[in-house]
Amino acid sequence: MRFPSPLVPARLIRRYKRFLADCVLDDGQEITAHCPNPGSMMGLRDENARIWLLPNDDPKKKLKYGWRLVELPDGHFAGIDAGLPNRLVKDALAEQQIEALDGYGIIRPEQRYGSEKSRIDFLLSEPGRPDAYVEVKNCHLRRDADWAEFPDCVTERGAKHLRELTAIAQQGGLAVMLYVVQRTDCARFRLAPDLDPAYAQAFDIARAAGVEILCHGTEITPEGIVLSGPLPVDPSPQANR
């Protein structure tokens, strides 16, 4: 997925009110950009971090820049748009690029399901095969070695999704949790139980019940972001890690 226009480099002053970021462009101009991420963004919102912004000339938008990337050491990047993984997965499903989920011809996003009135990110259907319920989560936390970790803060909504997927698996259905790692300096995936113990417990219950756990990386440059191959998931129980 290519960015619709060239990104502009800047330096981060501060991120605040969840969706706002004050920045300094390379020419010294200070601007406020939209931050498309409600999470904590641990490790990605440091003052003076080099970031990349998407400019727009839409008269309906008050903010003329949107924050898209953080530049990391050694030429790596992290994507901060929390809504992008769903778009990447949708394109990859349509093009049969996720091996564990290929062969499904009908892809329906945002379908209601479960007892808690949730919406599944993708419901996949194909005659002669069981429907696949696929939930997608954005991941861009790295604290140790090359481990990507999730979540970066408490997510009650995420735990609710795990409970819904667990119920589907217990009923004999195909339930899939797909984590998309939006940074290029990670090679494997695990949870962060110290940041959300309840989520880690729900994860272990879901995996034991038969929920399939998948993780894919991304290729990121200032030109665009695409879904890349699968990353290994830590097989050990996560709540007690």
Image: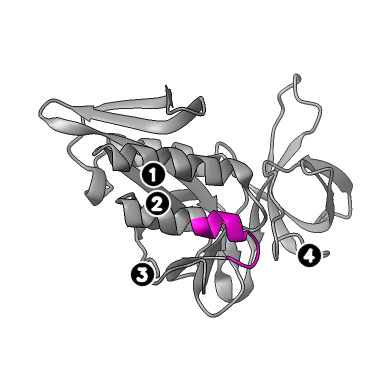
Identified by mark 3, the residue type is: Pro
- Residues in magenta, as a range: 193-201
Crowd rating for badge 4 (residues with CA inside 10 Å; few <14, some 14–19, many 20+):
some
Give the residue at mark 3: 235
- Determine the secondary structure under disc 1: helix
Do callouts 4 and 2 mark residues in contact (Cβ within 8 Å)? Answer: no
Crowd rating for badge 1 (residues with CA inside 10 Å; few <14, some 14–19, many 20+):
many
Crowd rating for badge 2 (residues with CA inside 10 Å; few <14, some 14–19, many 20+):
many
- Marks 3 and 4 sit apart, C-alpha to C-alpha, by 32 Å
Which label's residue is closer to the chain start, 4 or 2?
4
Crowd rating for badge 3 (residues with CA inside 10 Å; few <14, some 14–19, many 20+):
few
Mark toward the viewer: 3 or 1: 1
Mark identifier at residue 62: none
Give the residue at mark 1: 166
Do callouts 2 and 1 mark residues in contact (Cβ within 8 Å)? Answer: yes
Whether residue 39 is visible here, answered yes or no, is yes
Query: Could you tell me residue 82's position as x and y percent?
Result: 59, 44
Give the residue at mark 4: 46
- Marks 4 and 2 sit apart, C-alpha to C-alpha, by 34 Å
Identified by mark 1, the residue type is: Thr
Is residue 140 found left or right of 17 in the rendered image? left
- Determine the secondary structure under disc 2: helix
- Marks 4 and 1 sit apart, C-alpha to C-alpha, by 37 Å
Query: Residue pushed farthest top?
Result: 60
Is residue 170 found left or right of 165 in the rendered image? left
Whether residue 218 is visible here, answered yes or no, is no
Give the residue at mark 2: 206
Query: Could you tell me residue 73's position as x and y percent?
Result: 62, 74
Which label's residue is closer to the chain start, 2 or 1?
1
